[in-house]
Image: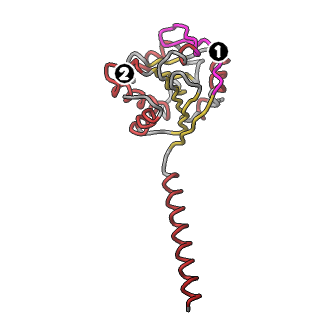
Amino acid sequence: MRHYLRTAGAVCLLIMLLLTMLSAYAGAADKPYKRSVERYQMPDVTLINQEGKNVRLRNLVDSGKPVIVDFIYGTCTTICPVLSACFTNLQSKLGANTQKVHLVSISIDPENDSPRVMREYLKRYRAKPGWDFLTGSRKDIDAVMKGFDAYIPNKMAHYAVTFIHMPGGDKWIRINGITSTSEFIEEIKKAGISL
């Protein structure tokens, strides 16, 4: 009888342990995005912003402000609007202080994203100062995507990825996947950006 009770107790303990592990795994799997901390080699390229002005990417990243980067294109109707809505909502949360954080959207469709297309895109999302949309030669755009380990050879197969960089460091927080605005804001706060 004692042997039976010990075996039954061990089986119950094992079942509880398995259920706890499955519950923890299911909770982690529910998150629609993955966060990691990475280091990237930023290519020394000069891109063009929505006003047609040259912008040296390294200078922009090393401006002394937090920088948030995503890869989008002007005619996208799937992932890009969601990413851009997060940028819009962040700027709303920043209020009059929108230039406290530099938002950078980099085109993955430089053949079609001219400064005019990028200006119209930013206007559609009510972008305020502090949000730049950059394009450049295919060679330079590819170098930037590869520098961020986010190479997208075909715009129709692109995926959501966002990068957060704090000034004075070489680490980037990489967010793979779609976040809600509240998750996006929470990740920004975790990165050390006070809102």
Q: Secondary structure at mark 1?
A: loop
Magenta highlight on residue 43: yes
Q: Amino acid at mark 1?
A: Asp
Task: Please tell me which residue lies in front, 9 or 80.
Answer: 9
Of circles 2 and 1, the one toward us is 1
Image location (x, y in percent) of residue 75 = 50, 25
Task: Please tell me which residue lies in front, 191 or 89.
Answer: 191
Q: Secondary structure at mark 2?
A: loop
How far apart marks 2 and 1 lie (CA) works out to 30 Å
Image location (x, y in percent) of residue 190 = 45, 36
Up-down relation of residue 50 to residue 106 (above or below): above
First in sequence: mark 2 vs mark 1? 1
By what rule are the colours in the image chosen?
Answer: secondary structure
Q: Would you name the residue on which mark 2 appears? A: 126
Q: Is residue 13 visible?
A: yes
Which residue sits at x=54%, y=72%?
A: 15
Q: Would you name the residue on which mark 1 appears? A: 44
Magenta highlight on residue 119: no
Image location (x, y in percent) of residue 136 = 60, 15
Which residue sits at x=60%, y=35%?
A: 157
Residues shaded magenta:
40-58
